Structure formats: structure tokens, C-alpha cells
């Protein structure tokens, strides 16, 4: 599985712990957490079952504002999102949008330190 514009990383932690670590790191570094959804729990309420899957929506209005000033359409991909899920082999994965894909999609100027680039965040937290 390798959808265009998505980066996927392995996690050595269970889904809940993965999202806990990511959320704590983001909050320590000034990000706003807008939502955290346990998709497995939500689907259980409808009688459906899936492997563990959690969703985290977050951002930094100052950084995101600068991107929206370049192109208001980038707001379609902001705030940023990360998901963590467990596959059928009990392996946990983390996925997010690829910064380069979003930059190209909206004609943003390329910036190695863009807030869209979540590689450093994920590597710092998960050691991927």
C-alpha cells in the first residue's frame, strides 16, 4: 500500500500509545490538538469492527496562516492529520500527507522546514 501523496511509517508501539506519544510531543512543542478520534471505538458503536485505528488532527495557526496566505486552498488540508492503525498482522503503522505533495497540489513555495513536513516529528517520537 503506497497511495500517492501519503507517507507511511512503522511504529513499535500499540496504536493508542503511538498517538499518545505523538500528541504529547505536539503539545510540548506548541501545537493545538483539534481532535483525537478512536475510529475503532466509533465504528463499534455502529456494530462494525475494525483493528485499532486512531486519528489526530492538529496544527499551529501561526504556521498554517502563513501557508494559507500563499494559497487559501491549502486550508482543505489543514489542520494537519496523522493516523495510526494496526494491520491484520498486528503491525502498527502511522500515516500522514507528504509535504511535497501538498506543496505541489497548491503551488506553495518549497521549504525544507515547512510545517507540512512531519518527518522530523514522527522520527523524533517513533524513532522510525
Image (cartoon, grey):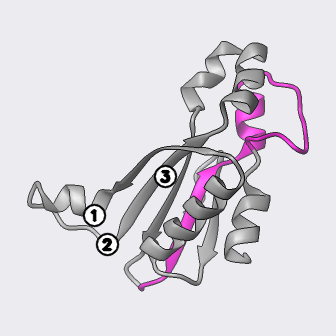
Residue 40 marker: 1
Q: Nearer the viewer, residue 51 or 23?
A: 23
Looking at the image, is mark 2 or mark 3 earlier in the sequence? Answer: 2
Is 72 located above or below residue 33 in the figure?
A: above
Of circles 1 and 3, which is in front?
Answer: 3
Name the image quarter holding the N terminus. bottom right
Which percent across, then down, holds residue 14? 46, 80
Residue 62, position as x, y percentages in the image:
73, 28
Magenta region, residue range = 90-116
Q: Residues within 10 Å of mark 1 (few under 14, many from 20)?
A: some
Q: Is residue 18 above or below residue 76?
A: below
Who's the residue at 57% across and 35% down the image?
A: 79
Q: Residue at x 75, y 24 (%)?
A: 67
**Drawn side of residue 1 relative to residue 123, left or right:** left
Per the image, the residue denoted by label 2 is 51
Calculate the distance from the C-alpha at mark 2 to the C-alpha at mark 3: 17 Å
Is residue 92 magenta-colored?
A: yes
| Residue under pointer 3 | 56
Along the horizontal axis of the image, is 30 left or right of 70? left
In which quadrant of the rendered image does the C terminus lie?
Answer: bottom right
Badge 2: residue crowd in 10 Å (few <14, some 14–19, many ≥20): some
Residue name at image x 48 percent, y 75 percent: 17
- Residue 25 placement: quadrant: bottom right
Mark 1 falls on what kind of element? helix
**Corner quadrant of residue 58:** top right
**Residue lying farthest to the left in this orientation:** 47
Chain-order first, disc 1 or disc 2: 1
Amino acid at each position: 500500500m503506497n497511495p500517492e501523496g501519503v507517507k507511511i511509517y512503522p511504529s513499535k508501539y500499540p496504536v493508542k500509545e503511538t498517538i499518545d506519544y505523538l500528541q504529547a510531543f505536539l503539545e510540548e512543542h506548541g501545537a493545538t490538538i483539534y481532535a483525537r478520534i478512536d475510529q475503532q471505538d466509533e465504528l463499534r458503536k455502529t456494530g462494525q469492527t475494525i483493528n485499532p485505528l486512531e486519528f489526530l488532527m492538529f496544527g499551529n495557526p501561526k504556521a498554517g496562516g502563513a501557508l494559507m496566505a500563499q494559497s487559501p486552498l491549502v486550508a482543505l488540508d489543514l489542520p494537519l492529520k496523522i493516523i495510526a492503525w494496526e494491520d491484520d498482522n498486528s503491525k502498527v503503522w502511522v500515516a500522514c500527507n507528504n509535504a511535497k505533495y501538498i506543496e505541489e497540489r497548491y503551488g506553495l513555495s518549497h521549504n525544507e522546514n515547512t510545517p507540512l513536513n512531519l518527518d522530523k516529528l514522527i522520527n523524533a517520537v517513533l524513532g522510525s
